[in-house]
Image (spheres, grey):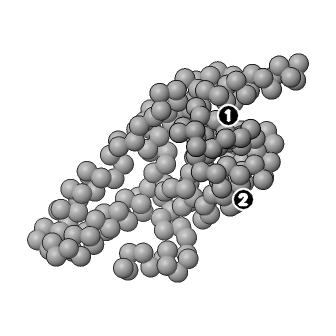
Amino acid sequence: MELFALAAEGRKPWYRNIEDEKAFFFRYYKYLLLGEGVKEDADKRAEMLFTELWCNNDRLLFPETVGVLEYFRKRGFRMGVISDTSPSLEYTLRQLGVAEYFSSFTASSLVGASKPSPVIFNAALDSLGVSAEESIYVDDYPPEADGARALGFTSFLIDRKNKNTGKWTIGSLKELIGFVEEAERQNT
C-alpha cells in the first residue's frame, strides 16, 4: 500500500508532528474503506472513522498511577515519557489527565528510533538534562527495560501478572516509592 511506502523503505519518521499524524490516519481510514469497495462518501466516512478511532480516550490509567506521579512530583523529580509511538503521545496523556506531571515526551516517531535503541533513550535524557545513572525507568517489555539498564538507568520491568521475577521486576508502580525511600535511607 502506498501509504506505508516510507516505512517499507526504512525512512523515518512517518510523521513529524501531530498534524502529519492526523493526515496519515485520515488517509489510512480512507484507504481501508476503498480497499473494501466502499467508494460512496469515502471522505465523509473516513472522517467519521477518524473521529471515532483516533485518540478517542480509549486508554485507562492503572489505579495507583496518579498517586505515584504525585509522590515523585512533590519530591522534585523531573519526569518524562519514552514511548514507541507517534506525535500524539503528549495529546494522549493530556486526555488521561497526567501530562502535567511530565516535562518530556519522547516519541519514537519523532526521534527516528524505537526502544531499546540508545538513540531514543539518549534523546529523552537530553530533553531532561540528566544522565542515565540519575534516572529511574519503567517498562512492561523485558528487552526495553534491559536496554535502559544496559545504558545505566535504574530500570524496572513492571509485570502486573507476576510472570517474571527478579531484583528489577515490580508488580505495581507503588513499589518505586519503596525503592526510592530505601535508597535514601541507605544514603543517609
User: Which quarter of the figure is the N terminus placed in?
Assistant: bottom left
| Residue 26 position in % (x across, y down) | 30, 63
The answer to whether residue 145 is above or below residue 166 is below
The answer to whether residue 127 is above or below residue 75 is below
| Between discs 2 and 1, the one toward the N terminus | 1
Three-letter amino acid code at the position of disc 2: Pro
| Residue 161 position in % (x across, y down) | 53, 39
Residue occupying the far left of the picture:
40
Rate crowding at label 2 as few (under 14), some (14 to 19) or many (20 or more) other CA atoms within 10 Å. some
| Residue 149 position in % (x across, y down) | 75, 49
| Residue 86 position in % (x across, y down) | 48, 56
52, 128: nearer the viewer: 52
> Residue at position x 20%, y 66% from top?
43
User: Which quarter of the figure is the C terminus placed in?
Assistant: top right
Name the element at disc 1: loop
Three-letter amino acid code at the position of disc 1: Arg
Name the element at disc 2: helix
The answer to whether residue 127 is above or below residue 65 is below
- Which residue, given by chain and number where applicable, does mark 1 sit on? 78
